[in-house]
Image (spheres, grey):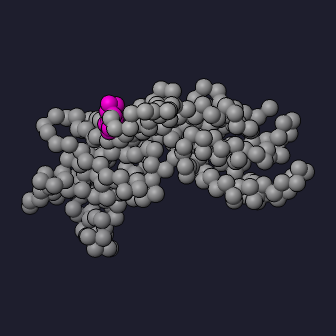
Amino acid sequence: MSPLNRNEISTMVSGGNAKIRTVELTYQPRTLYTDVATNASDYCSASTVRGNTSTQYEIDTTQNLKFEQSFDVEDMKSQCESNESWFADQIGKLVAVMDVAVNNKNASQANALLGGWSSDVTGIPDVTLAGDILQVKTLRDGTTDQPYASTLQGLQSAGMASNFGASTLVGGYQLHNYIAKIQEGCCTDYGLDIGAIQAKYNIASIQDRFVNVAQGGANDTAWMVANGALQVIYYNRWSGLFAAQDSNQSYGQIMGALGIPYDLVVKHDCGVISVSVIAITKLVALPDDMYQTGDHLDGVKGFAEVNVVNV
């Protein structure tokens, strides 16, 4: 949900009475350069129709996360701090837990959205393409602790060939620790300053527990994610005309630290205050037909797997 990843993307969940809501993405698939005619003699007419296509992402409003808690009014009154501060703190704690739960949901959904790499990656030194998985090594052959200096160049080249642009590695500790280690490195016996290499190729790395679990707990696996390739869509039941408040209950929204608005329901019933925080979210990726059959980027979605394979 960061501004860097969202990059002015806006989503609108369509109305209607169905439980399934849709978000539509409109785009134009890249035309193959092989479709360009040569030695044409007719400059004045065109017969091929090209234009935008679209993909609809569905979000089921019954598939949600809910976290709730009840408070006794007498307990609230007995606190030293003001009622407003104490109650706001309790709601804040509920929202903080929901943020973690949504992170976990995002990671579990992402695993089914992985795409591939450009077919051009097969010719890049220091990386190997095994199906849709990019294989790299972090150690020099036959060693236990000497870093392999060319991994970052290989990763950047694979991302460049696959049109990823600025990217982040997210996953287990092996690649993350490798990148952290070479930040402090100087010169190997090859005369390479691998610390300078890391600074130049500027690939960000994040270790994430939920991503690691989604990858099966393998610390030798990571995902490369291009900025904007993964997006969270969400639905709020109580936004707009559905927001309401009366003497003993209210319905509205509260923003989480992730930048996702959650539904918030507060109800007072005979001295007991019930609070519920509900998240209706779905992680989506770029469509499978962004690139046509025959394009070297066919199957690329800006989101793909990287495995560490050392020998």
What secondary structure is the magenta-colored segment mainly? loop
| Residue 17 position within the rendered picture, expressed as x and y whole percent measured from the top left | 13, 37
Question: Residue drawn 21% across and 62% down?
Answer: 73
| Depicted 80 relative to depicted 64: above or below | below
Camera-nearest residue between 1 and 152: 152
Count every numbered label the image shows and give the total.
Answer: 0
Q: Report if residue 154 lies within the magenta region.
A: no
The quadrant the C terminus occupies is: top right
252 left or right of 308 in image = left
At 81% from the left and 57% from the top, the residue drawn is 193
Residue stretch rendered in magenta on the structure: 46-54
Who's the residue at 20% across and 56% down the image? 252
Report whether residue 97 is seen.
Answer: no
Is 250 on the left or on the right of 201, as rendered?
left
Q: Is residue 8 above or below residue 146?
A: below
**Res. 240 visible in picture:** yes
Q: In terms of depth relative to the viewer, which is nearer, 29 or 59?
A: 29
